[in-house]
């Protein structure tokens, strides 16, 4: 008799363990600002990594790897419908939608434009963009992500966005190849740009804006490289203004701290134009997919535009 | 002369001989020990207790520079001191988890030219295993430069070689075809920009 009871209990326990699946908690929150609704989903990192997000004609479809419990505020601005492993968010007006995967804490950020985006006018005509590293010099590596690839993709996207506005844009490298610092400096000054932007990665979660170091040590045989060169000397004020405006635009959009740094870097010190090196957060802190790149390029364009208005 | 007197005489002769032999053995051993000790002191003065050299090493760690004091056996040759400084600087990578010194880097050689520039020849790991942004590269080189100039007298500058050759850059931000003084002798300034 006892043996039979034990077998029944064991059978039920086994059944529950096989069919009873643990649900993952998902926290959904939102904020609205000047024609933009931002939706943030927070959950386990591994759970979010395996979540598929797709933008349909009037919906955002989120397909999760398992079942979930959804916690959302009562005043959530859009209709959200959950079924099995799928969450559908209905869009009222179909505006531009950007989906970003961020870490620390792990989250999915969905930005929905609710009105036509204003494009900021840009007056400068010629740009040189410098994707850092290349070839055997991969820069910072995190898992399968390499700084040289991210900086090149960003540079190409920025080049495309500026070209669309009729600007002349030159990249120091267009493919995955090594280019020496001296060759880069020569290339930049040969093109005589109105603005110069170098793109690298930081080692932290912050955006870092590097400008030439202002101390003038006088002239010696290496002054053209490590002291402020005669070419950069007359642009140092503009370089700082460009850095400030780029930083403000990035901060407004990404809501993150910006580090402003004066540092003696040959690529900046030797350039005969307003020059800034933007270090984006390390690959371990952000995913540089198309949406993230588009968002960063928008911020850079806004920063350039506000720099021109202020100068 | 009777038998008794002869016996006393033989006893005294034997006693005198034993005294001479014992005295010889005692003094020969004592002189030998003193000579050996004296010879060792002449060859290796650093074996004396407390005869050490104190080095100030500037470690790049967690995107800043930290200073630590390290004790090594005393050296008088300036090149030997410089070698000890670089060895201690490189050793920090094994002991510290946040060290930005590239792992497995070895000192291959160290030379000093007529202009008092120290050439530090490092293994390829110094370039190959470097992971960092402009700030980390700056502190890495500044730490090495400060460590050498703080401990070795009369150094004019420091030049880095990798596997015996000049390199243009370590991590793609700073230009290493020139010696380090002009590259690292300024301070980084960080701020908040406009509000």
Image (tube, coloured by chain):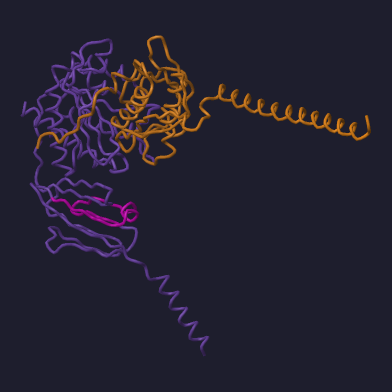
Chain colours: A purple, B orange
Residue pictured at 12% horizontal, 32% vertical: A245
Q: Is residue A177 visible?
A: no
Question: Residue shown at 39%/29% (left/top)?
Answer: B55
Q: Position of residue B178 (x, y in %)?
A: 34, 16
- Comparing B77 with A245, the one in front is B77
Q: Residue at x 77, y 28 (%)?
A: B21
**Which part of the image, by quadrant, shows the C terminus of chain B?**
top left
Q: Nearer the viewer, residue B9 or B32?
A: B9
Residue A49 on the magenta span: yes
Which quadrant would residue A18 be assigned to in this image? bottom left
Direction from residue A25 to residue B159 in the image, left or right = right
Q: Quadrant of residue B13?
A: top right
**Is residue B148 something that shows in the picture?**
yes
In the rendered image, residue A31, in percent from the top left (x then y), is placed at 13, 53
- Residue A204, compared with residue A220, is above or below; it is below
* Closer to us: B115 or A227: B115
**Location of residue A232 with respect to A49 vertically, above or below:** above
Where does the magenta region start and end?
A: A37-63
Q: Is residue B136 left or right of residue A301?
A: right
The x and y percentages for residue B48 are 51, 30
In terms of depth relative to the viewer, which is nearer, A77 or A223? A223
Q: Residue furthest front?
A: B1
Query: Is A271 inside the magenta-drawn segment?
Result: no
Measured from the top left, where is residue B4 in percent x and y?
Answer: 91, 35
Judge left or right: residue A203 versus residue B76: left
């Amino acid at each position: 008799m006892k043996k039979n009871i034990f077998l029944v209990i064991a059978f039920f326990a086994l059944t529950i363990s096989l069919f009873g699946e643990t649900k993952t908690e998902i926290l959904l929150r939102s904020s609205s600002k000047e024609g933009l609704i931002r939706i943030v989903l927070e959950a386990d990192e591994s759970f979010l990594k395996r979540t598929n997000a797709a933008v349909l004609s009037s919906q955002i479809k989120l397909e999760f790897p398992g079942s979930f419990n959804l916690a959302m505020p009562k005043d959530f601005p859009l209709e959200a419908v959950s079924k099995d492993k799928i969450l559908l968010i209905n869009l009222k007006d179909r505006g531009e939608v950007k989906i970003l995967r961020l870490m620390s804490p792990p989250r999915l950020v969905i930005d929905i434009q609710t009105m036509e985006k204003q494009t900021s006018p840009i007056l400068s005509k010629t740009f040189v963009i410098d994707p850092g590293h290349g070839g055997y010099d991969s820069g910072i590596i995190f898992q399968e992500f390499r700084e040289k690839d991210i900086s090149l993709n960003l540079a190409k996207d920025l080049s495309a966005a500026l070209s669309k506005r009729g600007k002349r844009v030159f990249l120091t490298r267009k493919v995955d190849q090594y280019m020496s610092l001296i060759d880069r400096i020569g290339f930049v000054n040969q093109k005589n740009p109105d603005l110069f932007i170098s793109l690298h990665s930081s080692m932290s979660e912050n955006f870092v804006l590097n400008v030439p170091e202002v101390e003038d040590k006088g002239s010696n045989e290496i002054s053209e490289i490590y002291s402020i060169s005669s070419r950069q000397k007359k642009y140092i004020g503009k370089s700082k203004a460009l850095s400030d405006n780029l930083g403000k635009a990035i901060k407004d959009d990404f809501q993150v701290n910006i580090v402003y740094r004066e540092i003696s870097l040959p690529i900046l010190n030797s350039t005969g134009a307003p020059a800034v090196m933007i270090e984006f957060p390390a690959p371990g802190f952000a995913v540089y997919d198309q949406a993230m790149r588009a968002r960063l390029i928008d911020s850079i364009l806004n920063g350039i535009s506000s720099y021109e208005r202020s100068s | 002369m009777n038998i008794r007197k002869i016996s006393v005489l033989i006893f005294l002769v034997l006693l005198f001989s034993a005294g001479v032999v014992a005295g010889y053995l005692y003094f020969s051993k004592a002189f030998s020990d003193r000579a050996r000790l004296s010879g060792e002191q002449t060859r290796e003065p650093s074996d004396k207790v407390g005869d050490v050299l104190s080095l100030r090493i500037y470690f790049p760690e967690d995107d800043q520079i930290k200073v630590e004091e390290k004790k090594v056996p005393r050296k008088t040759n300036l090149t030997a001191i410089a070698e000890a400084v670089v060895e201690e600087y490189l050793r920090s990578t094994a002991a510290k988890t946040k060290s930005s010194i590239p792992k497995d880097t070895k000192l291959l050689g160290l030379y000093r030219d007529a202009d008092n520039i120290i050439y530090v020849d490092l293994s390829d790991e110094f370039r190959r295993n470097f992971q960092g942004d402009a700030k980390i590269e700056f502190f890495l080189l500044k730490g090495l430069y400060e460590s050498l100039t703080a401990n070795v007298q009369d150094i004019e500058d420091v030049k880095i070689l990798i596997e015996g050759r000049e390199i243009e850059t370590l991590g793609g931000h700073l230009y290493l075809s020139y010696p380090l003084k002009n590259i690292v002798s300024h301070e980084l300034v960080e701020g908040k920009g406009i509000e």
